[in-house]
Image: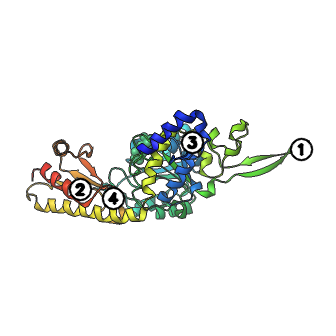
Amino acid sequence: MRRHVDAQLETWASLGVNGHFTDMANSPLAQWQDLAESCARASAAIVGCSAQEVVVMNTLTVNLHLMMASFYRPDARRHKVLLEARPFPSDHYAIESQVRWHGLDPARSMVKLEPAAGSALVPTEQVLRAIDEHADDAALLLLPGIQYYSGQLFDVPAITAHARARGIVVGWDLAHAAGNVELRLHDWGVDFACWCTYKYLNAGPGAIAAAFVHERHGGVEWAVRRDSSSSSSSTPVYRPRLAGWYGGDKSVRFDMDSLFVPTPGAAGFQLSNPSALDLASLAAALSVFAKTSMRDLRSKALVLTAYAEHLLHRILARAPAKGPPLFRLLTPSDPSQRGSQLSILLREGLLEAVAAALEDNGVACDKRKPDVIRIAPVPLYCSFEDVWKFMQIFRGALEL
Ligand SMILES: *Cc1c(COP(=O)(O)O)cnc(C)c1O
């Protein structure tokens, strides 16, 4: 990361604004004009699509809004959004505000999928049933690839195919899935997806985000129009969107013409000149992924997470039998329905003491009030020994 950021500062010091159009010798980075595109190329392998289907821009919530501006186009018949009952709050705010923005009533237009009784999970069959039930009036389905709280990995291909076959547009929030599990967004026919790069992709706090737009939505055609005096002109025809100059075709970007001609593909959804420093840290993070593959990472992750789960079950087996169990796992036990994460629901009242004991022993662990801690042995930088050490500390934190 330091090498990439230093190279960027060096370019800025020596070339100034010309860094936009000049390749620097010995820099691991493309010139600034091409940097977002080179990050998109590196991201494509991670989410399973072509480079033209990825755009690197903004932050996750901003991209959700931009994608909904283009893909959530309610009409008198189709106006509903299918979402989960308790999504990450930002997603809920984004969806609700989009619904209101269209002058619609959230109570009528938001269909919230509740987890099954006594569980944090939303079974696939339940999602498919909800799609059938709202097949005539749903405009959009927007779900997380991996649910941030429970760690549930949704069946993206089955849900996508089912919804699309009923005329519903399908978007996925991949904040916890990108860089965590194998994805094939193109082959699965997903309409759009958004993700941040500061979770499993390690680009740093608040780093620049990305979005996927399926090839079938990125086309730019030219239509010839004849006016009354029978002179003709051509206009670009493309999917409606909120546009900005960086979505414009690179070859004419600096012509400062007011006719917007989008770059074909996802890049045509970009608005602004992105921060070169931000892109440098993403490029550095992606360069680590380029040394391996999602298949290899996933195959280690499956074993690493299973090992963590096994040790958790052993801790439970050794705990005194009286009273309710010290904890239970919210995350599916089926490895094909989860990524690296395991969410541990602690017995009521234990969270603060457990979190303090973990911290005292050098473990920085996520906690979600009232009772959940989430652990994720990430294959890129966690070893089996790390998992074992964590479990010793966790057992101590439970005073066993
Ligand atoms: C992390 C996360 C966000 C955060 O969005 P930003 O706009 O990057 O701050 C939104 N949604 C989900 C599901 C997340 O996991």
Residue 208 appears anywhere in the view: no
Label 1 packing within 10 angstroms: few (<14), some (14-19), many (20+): few
Image marks 3 and 1: residues in contact by CB distance under 8 Å? no
**In this picture, residue 363 sits left or right of residue 124:** left
* Three-letter code for the amino acid on which mark 1 is drawn: Ser
Residue 386 bears which disc, if any?
2
The span from disc 1 to disc 2 (Cα, nearest Å) is: 72 Å
Q: CA distance from mark 1 to mark 4?
A: 63 Å
* Pair 3/1: label in front: 3
Q: Are marks 4 and 3 in contact (CB under 8 Å)?
A: no
Mark 2 or 3, closer to the camera: 3
- The Cα–Cα distance between marks 2 and 3, rounded to whole angstroms, is 39 Å
Q: Say what amino acid the circle numbered 2 marks.
A: Asp
| Between discs 1 and 4, the one toward the N terminus | 1
Tag nearer the camera, 1 or 4: 4
At label 4, which amino acid type do we have?
Pro
Mark 4 or mark 3, earlier in chain: 3
**Badge 2, how many Cα within 10 Å: few under 14, some, many 20+?**
few
Read off the residue under disc 3.
32
* Picture quarter with the N terminus: top left
Disc 4 crowd, CA 10 A, few/some/many (<14, 14-19, 20+): many
Q: Earlier in the sequence, mark 2 or mark 3?
A: 3
Q: Which residue position is annotated with label 1?
A: 231
Q: Which residue is mark 4?
A: 379
